[in-house]
Amino acid sequence: MYGSSTQYQNWTFKDEHELVKLRIQANSDFIEKFGINMTSVERAKHFLTIEEEHLMVRSYEHSLRDFCKKFRDPRDARIRMLPSVTTTAQHYFKRFYLYNSVMDYHPKEILVTCVYLACKIEEFYVTINDFVHNVRGDKKKAAEIILNNELQLTQELQFHLIIHQPFRPVEGLLIDIKTRFPQLRDPERLRPYIDEFLERVNLTDAILLYAPGQIALAAVTNAVSRLGENLDQYVTDILFPSEQRHHLSVLIEAVRKIKKMVKNAEPPLSDTVRREIEAKLEKCRNQQNNPNSSQYRANYSEWDDEDLPIAAAPYNDDLGLGVERIRSPSAY
């Protein structure tokens, strides 16, 4: 049950101010650690600001979505990544950067690690070799980075890996509407709009603030509104009868805020802005976590070819990552 889950107890926050406070702390902690011998002016020029970090994380959330959309199993290109995997990966990614700075761990490496871990948890079976076929460049290096980061990611998530998602509540609502609210003709018409809403909500902080059931109701009522109809009577008279009416005002406010967050979801960065921040990040990132640095190599032994066999099958670039330019761990 969601109410007794680690998601509710540890990863559902009171409001957006609490999230901002955590992100500011992560940025500040990194700067204090690595800028100890710098003046305040030097720090301001050298390190990313909290706003620049925020823009980077938001931009890579779009990259994560695109990666999952374009993912193909090299053994069978008809196999697509499940929406549940994408949603779980987005939760992991957001959680990770509540307590870590992008200057410490580059999002392009954490992104693919989140997706790979989510595949395991959501039982979307894919080997590491097949997974990295979706990453352009050096497949062996990409696999090494993902496997090296996997335990670190799991630890930062406090081993809380089960994600309660809005998909089941959506199905429950649709069944209930079909059964108890025949005034809404053919609820299956809502599905394209619901799917679009649930994809967009992952690009906001709503999934860190609201219950899956609240998000599901927001998705369904938004879909109904887009068809020029409404569910007011269903919500007020059927979903919440008079003896439960005291919960209604809280739910309506939550649904309203979720819809507003989805409507105001930030678009991806322009290429120009992204390149500027990326260039600054390359200069200030923690070299111990940079796969191209000697410090990183000193921390991790080389993989044996026998330990990490990479299939020699030709790679079809049309099925590649498609996460523009420098957005995969092998595109350095």
Image (tube, rainbow, N blue to C red):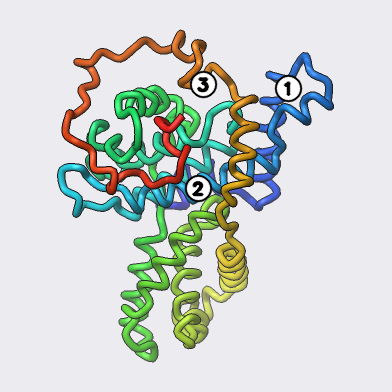
Please state which of residues 152 and 62 is positioned toward the viewer in this rendering: 62
| Mark 2 to mark 1 CA distance (whole Å) | 27 Å
Neighbours of disc 3 within 10 Å: few (<14), some (14-19), many (20+): some
The answer to whether mark 2 and mark 1 are in CB contact below 8 A is no
Residue receiving disc 3: 289
Percent position (x, y) of residue 291? 46, 21
Residue at the disc numbered 1: 32
Return the disc, 3 or 2, that comes first in the chain's sequence: 2
Q: Residues within 10 Å of mark 1 (few under 14, many from 20)?
A: few
Instruction: Name the residue rendered at 38%, 77% in the picture.
Output: 190
The answer to which of marks 3 and 1 sits earlier in the sequence is: 1
Residue of label 2: 61
Element carrying mark 2: helix
The Cα atoms of the two marked residues, 3 and 1, are separated by 18 Å
* Residue located 45% across and 45% down the image: 324
Q: x, y (%) of residue 36?
A: 75, 16
**Quick check: 91 left or right of 12?**
left
Are circles 3 and 1 on residues that touch, CB within 8 Å? no
Nearer to the camera, 314 or 181:
314
* Type of amino acid at the residue the image marks with label 2: Glu
Determine whether the residue tagged by mark 1 lies in a helix, strand or loop. Answer: helix
Residue 297 in the image: above or below residue 145: above
Res 250 visible: no
Residue 116 numbered mark, or none: none
Q: Please state which amino acid type lies under the numbered disc 1.
A: Glu
